């Protein structure tokens, strides 16, 4: 998901010293932790059935939840946010009793839940869901007149949670293995959701039902409903895993513009398969779907609202010119297919796994088509947007994100680690290896850190600590004295030992291996030092440090 505007606002707040860690509540714990009523069952399948009604902005429908019992328990937690209401819950034809605690519903199961067995409940609901105030950052359901008497209906809910529009297990750690989404709309409109369209069933009441099927695990905020009088076209992308079905859905008036702009989609697939490995959802296809908001990484149906402009709504976030060479939403939101939809955080506190890597993918895309220096220019250019206000990692267990620095600082952290690895092919294999090793999994951020360290052949834990868990930027302090160059890291966490590439005088670039202790290096008479710009560090000549 994108947080650009939110990010800029946040910078302004923190400069004034007003940023404060948000306090968590009982409701945050119910939403953000693996409660006793969640931990005992493993989600295997959802069938979501929804009928949106544009006349009064309401939804009605049900979710069938199929799960495997892994521990004995008789109470199941299902989430649905106010003002939506659950009217009925059924298991094996019997109606069940439930209690509401905010957005959490605790349902008493009558049937004995036996470990190892697969069970099903169906949860019926209706009501007027929260309107998306500023999607995708402040999401919900959006109802927008299309000027032709129809209503465009779209959903977006990262962070807020998918329980804002349908009943589900609203925690990221558990994903269904597959999912069916059935959306009923008026005959002149269509729905585009995730996966493949299996059938369209014509109903007697001037509506039809679109049945979409997702063959792969899907995270809950990735599920979406997009209703409009779309026109579409298709193509086949010849990728690393064979033929990938690619389809596009846009409003009729934008068809010509879209056909031109969306040529970037196969270009994106080519570049990202090179860097990250095969597109992770061949079985579900890849779709780009026009919506009235900026965009979101909905799995296998990436939503698009960048106005058919280059850059981010026509702006270059890096201020280098490279950001205007491509459409930010096509590239960024699709990058999330690898980092967000394929590798998914268990807890939103680790959101850098989605946004740090996806921000970084923008620079790799730039490099793929415009060269290595261009990619470096881009990622370095985005440093101006880093606030260093609070750590990138948020608070676990209460559905709380960390600093918006997860985007640009996250990207610069990865670019810096690439310099430390100092072997471009090895680095590419690490990125591809991540997508293979954690294929279709939910992860703790620490698993990603450990994998990168292991594959790099160097313990990078202090580097991750510095950039993800601290706000200070390392300073390479140095001085030239009788013994040559003295240098050390300042402004760092205990044990920080990242190598850094420098140029001394007119010599060649070379690595220094500083720690927090002063070290020395014999040098020739030249007394200048410059740090490779690709490292996100600072440097300072120290007058008094000479040994
Ligand atoms: Zn994003």
Image (tube, rainbow, N blue to C red):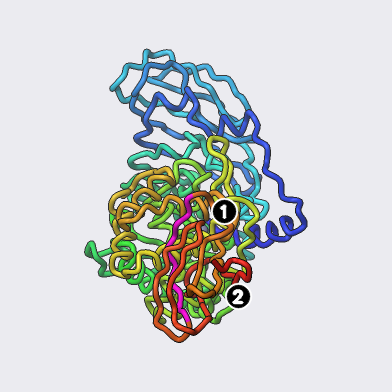
Q: Is residue 500 magenta?
A: yes
Residue at 77 percent across and 57 percent down: it is 16
Q: Look at the picture and state if 228 lies above or below 182.
A: below
Query: Residues at badges 2 and 1 in contact (C-beta under 8 Å)?
Result: no
Residue at 49 percent across and 41 percent down: it is 347
Left or right: 14, with 464 as reference point: right
Write down the residue under mark 2. Answer: 315
Which label is found at residue 153? 1
CB at mark 2 closer than 8 A to ligand 1?
no
Query: x and y percent of residue 146 in the render?
Result: 61, 63
The quadrant in which residue 281 appears is bottom left
Is residue 203 shown to the viewer in this render? no
Query: x and y percent of residue 130 in the render?
Result: 64, 43
Q: Is mark 1 on a helix, strand or loop?
A: strand
Q: What stretch is highlighted in magenta?
A: 495-504
Query: x and y percent of residue 174 in the render?
Result: 41, 37
Residue at 29 percent across and 56 percent down: it is 433
Left or right: 529, with 134 as reference point: left
Query: x and y percent of residue 189 in the render?
Result: 50, 57
Is residue 381 shown to the viewer in this render? yes
């Amino acid at each position: 998901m994108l947080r650009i505007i939110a990010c800029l606002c946040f910078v302004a707040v923190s400069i004034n010293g007003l940023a404060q860690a948000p306090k968590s509540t009982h409701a945050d714990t119910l939403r953000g932790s693996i409660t006793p009523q969640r931990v005992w069952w493993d989600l295997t399948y959802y069938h979501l059935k929804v009928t949106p009604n544009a006349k009064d902005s309401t939804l009605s429908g049900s979710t069938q939840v199929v799960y495997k019992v892994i521990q004995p328990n008789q109470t199941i937690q299902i989430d649905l946010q106010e003002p939506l209401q659950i009217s009925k819950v059924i298991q094996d034809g019997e109606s069940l009793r439930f209690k509401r605690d905010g957005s959490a519903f605790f349902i008493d199961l009558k049937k004995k839940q036996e470990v190892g067995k697969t069970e099903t409940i169906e949860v019926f609901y209706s009501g007027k869901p929260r309107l998306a105030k500023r999607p995708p950052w402040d999401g919900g359901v959006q109802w927008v007149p299309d000027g032709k008497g129809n209503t465009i209906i779209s959903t977006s809910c990262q962070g807020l949670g998918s329980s804002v529009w349908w009943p589900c297990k609203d925690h990221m750690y558990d994903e269904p293995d597959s999912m069916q989404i059935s959306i009923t709309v008026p005959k002149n409109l269509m729905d585009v959701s995730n996966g493949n369209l299996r059938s369209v069933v014509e109903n007697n009441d001037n509506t039809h039902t679109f049945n979409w099927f997702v063959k792969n695990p899907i995270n809950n905020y990735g599920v979406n409903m997009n209703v409009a009088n779309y026109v579409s076209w298709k193509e086949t992308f010849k990728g690393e895993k064979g033929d990938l079905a690619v389809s596009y859905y846009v409003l009729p008036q934008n068809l010509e513009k879209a056909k031109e702009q969306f040529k970037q989609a196969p270009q994106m697939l080519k570049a990202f398969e090179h860097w990250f490995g095969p597109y992770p959802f061949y079985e579900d296809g890849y779709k780009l779907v026009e919506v009235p908001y900026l965009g979101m990484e909905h799995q296998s149906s990436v939503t698009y609202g960048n106005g058919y402009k280059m850059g981010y709504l026509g702006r270059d976030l890096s201020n280098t010119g490279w950001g205007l060479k491509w459409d930010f939403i096509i590239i960024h939101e699709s990058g999330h297919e690898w980092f967000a939809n394929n590798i998914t955080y268990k807890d939103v506190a680790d959101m850098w796994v989605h946004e740090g890597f996806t921000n970084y993918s923008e620079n790799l895309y730039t490099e793929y088509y415009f060269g290595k220096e261009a990619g470096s220019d881009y990622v370095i250019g985005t440093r101006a947007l880093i606030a260093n206000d609070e750590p990138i990692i948020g608070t676990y267990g209460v559905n709380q994100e960390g600093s918006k620095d997860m985007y640009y600082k996250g990207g610069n952290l990865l670019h810096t680690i690439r310099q430390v690895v100092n072997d471009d092919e090895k680095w590419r294999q690490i990125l591809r290896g991540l997508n293979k090793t954690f294929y279709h999994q939910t992860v703790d951020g620490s698993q990603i850190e450990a994998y990168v360290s292991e594959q790099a052949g160097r313990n990078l834990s202090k580097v991750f600590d510095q950039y993800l868990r601290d706000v200070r930027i390392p300073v390479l302090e140095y001085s030239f004295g009788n013994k040559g160059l003295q240098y050390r890291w300042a402004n760092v966490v205990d044990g920080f030992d990242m190598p850094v590439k420098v140029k001394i005088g007119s010599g060649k670039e070379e690595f220094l291996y500083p720690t927090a202790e002063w070290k020395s290096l014999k040098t020739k008479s030249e007394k200048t030092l410059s740090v490779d710009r690709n490292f996100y560090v600072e440097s300072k000549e120290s007058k008094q440090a000479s040994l």
